Image (tube, helix red, strand yellow):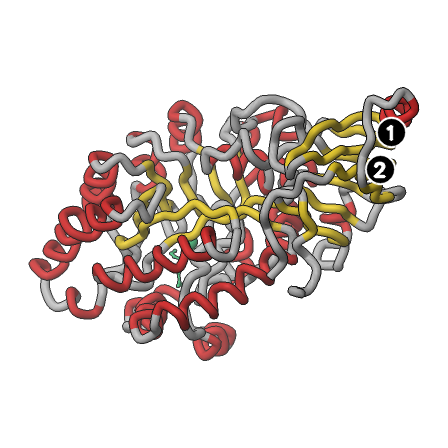
């Protein structure tokens, strides 16, 4: 693993064809502002102590050099390249054990995701495999995964639990997320998604179901908060998962414990999730394949970020969320991988950025804002990552092209030449 500690060295990344600073302030962007990339041509960026110290035209940089106002220890030529903020993956379930490759084949032969889930496969299959894994096994599998995800351009991640569904296993998943932050140096926010599915042992009766929901509110969430293991709570509020009334109970308990909310909403139908996200002023409502004008207006009024997950639409063969309608309605949009063992095991947020254009009809500029600044804003990290402005962490990408639109035009090609986090290269093989 590359050493992730802050460096005191001053590094200049010089003469890039384009630097996307994203300019602007910390608020999530909506409408026309979603196209604001703060683009500088022929520009240079200076890193000091792991943070952006200066960014501006290359000619100004050379003048400052000549005047002795800047004296970088290292100069790194970026002629002909694009420099942009590193990506922020604001919706993942990346801590799990095992795999569901068998279900992939079943689905490709015509089986339906919701039917597999109702029959005890799907999420419940990952719950069985995750419960059976030790913390160390879970850590090692997840570390390999998140390291691959970072080499695809993301340096900041939201990670949900939800493959434990009992106290000990939920805590174990969240402890692994914390170790990925504290031992491996990834920037991570974590979310308790104990309300991801009704576990096998609570499926016998309505009473057992109600008791499980009660246990989330009175045992699991308080224990998670007691250990400081989560920043957010989430509920899978959808057909075949939790009703709006059940989700509302879990959300109210989470809010009382001081957690903020992010909700899985409106993936399979108009099931009340988006409404609930607006009513409770969730930080984010995610999926949103089915959304009415009223629901869009409610999200905008409540300041909820709409987090779109087009990789899941691709993998499940579902419709794509309507990104254009959200831009036109003035709802700020984030885009994330949803990386999970079932509905979307895609790890490459840079490719999903392309899918957000082809599937959800965002423009390349909007999709970049959605995978950087807006995602950071939805996680309360807008003063740390997602833009390239003095004082923010030097988390950035060097793209092997002179035009940022190539990320979409050639989506899936290996255009990300370098990934930097906290002012250090993190894309190279471990020493
Ligand atoms: O976001 N929708 C609910 N949860 C995940 C899928 C989890 C799974 O299939 O394991 C999602 O798509
Ligand atoms: Fe999800």
Name the disc covering residue 48, or none: none
Q: Which residue is at 33% across, 46% downward?
A: 230
In this orientation, does residue 359 appear?
Answer: no
Q: Which residue is at 77% across, 34% downward?
A: 19
Depth check: 69 or 219 in front?
Answer: 69
| Lower position in the chain sequence, tag 1 or tag 2 | 2
Where's the N terminus, which quadrant?
bottom right
Residue 90, above or below 62: below
Question: Where's residue 410, x and y in %?
Answer: 77, 54
Crowd class of label 1 (few under 14; some 14 to 19; many from 20; radius 10 Å): many
In this orientation, does residue 124 appear?
Answer: yes
Question: Where's residue 375, x and y in %?
Answer: 53, 39
The image quarter containing residue 58 is top right
Left or right: 179, with 335 as reference point:
left
Tell me the element at label 2: strand
Q: Residue furthest left?
A: 207
Q: Which residue is at 27% across, 54% downward?
A: 194
Q: Which residue is at 20% across, 46% downward?
A: 222
Q: Which residue is mark 2?
A: 14
Q: Are marks 1 and 2 in contact (CB under 8 Å)?
A: yes
Residue 130, above or below 280: below
Question: Where's residue 170, x and y in %?
Answer: 28, 59
Mark 1 to mark 2 CA distance (whole Å) = 7 Å
Where's the C terminus, which quadrant?
bottom right
Residue 102, above or below 398: below
* Label 1, ligand 2: CB separation under 8 Å: no
Q: Which residue is mark 1?
A: 58
Question: Where's residue 183, x and y in %?
Answer: 47, 56
The image quarter containing residue 96 is bottom left
Q: Give the quarter the ligand 1 occupies.
A: bottom left
Tell me the element at label 1: helix
Left or right: 114, with 356 as reference point:
left
């Amino acid at each position: 693993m590359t050493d992730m500690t802050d460096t005191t060295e001053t590094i200049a990344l010089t003469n890039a064809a384009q630097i996307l600073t994203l300019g602007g302030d910390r608020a999530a962007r909506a409408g026309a502002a979603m196209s604001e990339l703060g683009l500088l041509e022929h520009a240079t960026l200076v890193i000091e102590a792991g943070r952006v110290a200066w960014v501006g035209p290359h000619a100004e940089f050379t003048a400052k050099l000549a005047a002795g106002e800047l004296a970088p220890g290292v100069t790194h030529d970026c002629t002909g390249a694009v420099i942009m903020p590193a990506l922020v993956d604001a919706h993942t379930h990346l801590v799990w054990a095992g795999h569901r490759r068998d279900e992939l084949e079943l689905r490709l032969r015509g089986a339906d995701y919701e039917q597999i889930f109702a029959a005890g496969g799907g999420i419940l299959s990952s719950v069985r495999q995750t419960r059976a894994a030790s913390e160390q096994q879970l850590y090692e599998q997840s570390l390999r995964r998140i390291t691959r995800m970072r080499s695809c351009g993301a340096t900041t991640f939201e990670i949900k639990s939800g493959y434990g569904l009992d106290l000990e296993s939920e805590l174990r998943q969240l402890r692994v997320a914390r170790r990925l932050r504290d031992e491996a140096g990834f920037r991570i926010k974590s979310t308790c998604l104990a309300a991801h599915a009704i576990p096998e042992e609570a499926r016998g009766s309505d009473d057992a179901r109600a008791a499980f929901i009660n246990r989330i509110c009175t045992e699991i969430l308080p224990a998670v908060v007691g250990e400081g293991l989560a920043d957010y709570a989430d509920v899978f509020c959808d057909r075949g998962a939790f009703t709006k009334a059940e989700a509302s109970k879990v959300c109210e308990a989470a809010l009382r414990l001081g957690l903020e909310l992010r909700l899985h909403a409106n993936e399979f139908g108009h099931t009340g999730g988006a409404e609930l996200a607006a009513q409770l002023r969730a930080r984010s409502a995610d999926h949103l394949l089915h959304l009415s004008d009223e629901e869009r207006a409610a999200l905008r009024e409540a300041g909820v970020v709409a987090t779109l997950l087009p990789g899941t639409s691709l993998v499940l063969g579902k419709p794509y969320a309507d990104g254009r309608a959200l831009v036109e309605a003035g709802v700020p949009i984030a885009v994330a991988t949803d990386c999970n063992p079932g509905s979307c095991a895609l790890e490459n947020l840079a490719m999903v950025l392309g899918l957000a254009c082809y599937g959800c009809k965002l423009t390349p500029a909007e999709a970049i804002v959605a995978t950087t600044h807006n995602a950071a804003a939805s996680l309360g990290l807008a003063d740390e990552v997602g833009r390239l402005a003095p004082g923010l962490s030097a988390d950035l990408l060097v793209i092997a092209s002179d035009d940022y639109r190539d990320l979409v035009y050639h989506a899936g090609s290996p255009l990300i030449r370098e990934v930097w986090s906290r002012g250090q290269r993190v894309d190279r093989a471990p020493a």
